Amino acid sequence: LLPSDSENKWANYVQGVILQYLPDLANEEETLQLDVAIAGDVPLGSGLSSSASLEVATAVFLESILSDRGFSSYRTKAGKKSGLGDKERKIERALRCQRAENTFCGVPCGVMDQFVSSAGCHDKVLLIDCRSLDFREVSMAVSSPKPVLVITNSNVKHDLGGSEYPVRVKQCKEATEILQSKINSGIVSLRDATVRDIEEATTSGALKGVLLQRARHVVSENQRTEDTADALEKGDWALVGKLMNLSHESMRNDYEVSCKEIDFLVDLAQKFEGVYGSRLTGGGFGGCTVTLVDEGSAEKLQNHLKEAYEKHTGMTCNCFVTSPANGACLITL
C-alpha cells in the first residue's frame, strides 16, 4: 500500500479499508492485486456519509473476493471456529471501516456512519448503542398521510478531517473528565451523564462556557434520540418533528456546528406547511438538512427551498426524497 495520499484524499478511504483486511490473507507473502472502478451518487462532503459508504462498499467487495477467508483474522482472535453470523459480520465490518478512517485517514470519527452503511435495513432506522455495539431496527409506523424525508444539499462543502470535528472530540473529553471528578465518578463518557448531572454541573459551576455547551448538547441529544425512536414506532410525527427542531437548535447554539446557509434552509422548511421538523444532518459546517414532511407536500417544499435559497444566497441547493434502505450488499450485473 502507498502512504496516505494528500492530493487524492478519497483514495485513502479505499486503501485504509484494504489495510484492515490484509490480516485475513493466508500469510504475509500473499497479496491482493485489484483493478477497481468506483461509481457513486452520494454527494461528496455533504454530511451524508460519503466516506463511510465508500469504505463499507469497499469492505463488502473485499469480503466477496476473500470468500471464506473474510474475517478469518477476527475469528482466530476471538477463538471462533465457525463462521460469523450476519449481525456479527455487519458489526465487525463497521469497526474495520471506522479504524481505517481513524488510522489511515486521520479522522477521529465514531462508528455511526460506518455502522448504518453496513447494517442499514429497508424501511427501518437503526438505534445504535456505540458502546455495546448492539443495535435495534426501528420501524416507522404506517399512517396516512405518510411522511417522507427530504434531503437538501446546501452545496456548502466541508472536509471532516480538516474541520472542527477533532476540536469537538477534545472538548467532549474534557467535559467528561470534569463531570467524572466533580459530579459523578460513574461518568466514563458523556453518554453516562444525565440531564440532572448537567443541571448540577451548571449550578455548581463545575462546567462553564464552551465545555458546558458541548456536554449539554450531547446529553440532551442522546435523550432526544431515544425519544425519537419511540415516537417513530408510534407514528407521533408531531413529536418527531419537535425533537428534530430541538436537535437543530442544540447543534446550532450548544455544539456550534451549523452555519448561516444551513440555518436558512432549516428555518424555511420549519415554517412550510406540511413539515413536521427539520435539522442539520452530518458533521456540520455546511452539508445537508433533513426534513420530515407529509408526502403530498414534498414536491412543493423542494421547489420552495430551491427558489428561496438561490434568491437569498445566490447558490443552488439540490433536493431529493429518500427513505431507509438496506446497507451495502453485492449486486449481480
Image (spheres, grey):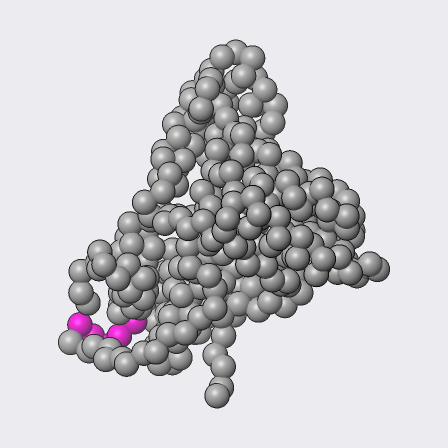
Does the magenta stretch mainly form a helix, a strand or a loop?
loop
Q: Is residue 232 left or right of residue 205?
A: right
* Image coordinates for residue 305, horizontal then vertical, percent: 63, 51
Is residue 251 shown left or right of residue 59? right
Drawn side of residue 8 relative to residue 122, left or right: left
> Which residue is pictured at 60% across the width and 54% down the height?
306
Residue 36 percent coordinates (x, y): 32, 78
Say which residue appears at 75% left-offset and 57% top-offset.
Answer: 297
Quarter of the image for residue 216 reads top right
What is the residue that sits farthest to the bottom in this orientation? 333
The outermost residue toward the right is 144
- Please provide percent x and percent y for residue 310: 55, 50
Q: Residue at x 27, y 56 (%)?
A: 104
Residue 277 location, x and y as percent? 69, 45
Between residues 179 and 303, which one lies in front from this camera angle? 303
Q: Is residue 313 visible?
A: yes
Judge from the rendering whether residue 279 lies leftward or rightward of residue 147; answer left or right.
Answer: left
Question: Was residue 100 drawn as part of the magenta stretch in this picture?
Answer: no
In the picture as drawn, the residue positioned furthest to the top comes out as 204
Q: Residue at x 67, y 46 (%)?
A: 269
> In this rendering, is residue 215 above or below 310?
above
Report the magenta residues as a range.
24-28
Q: Nearer the viewer, residue 146 or 320?
A: 320
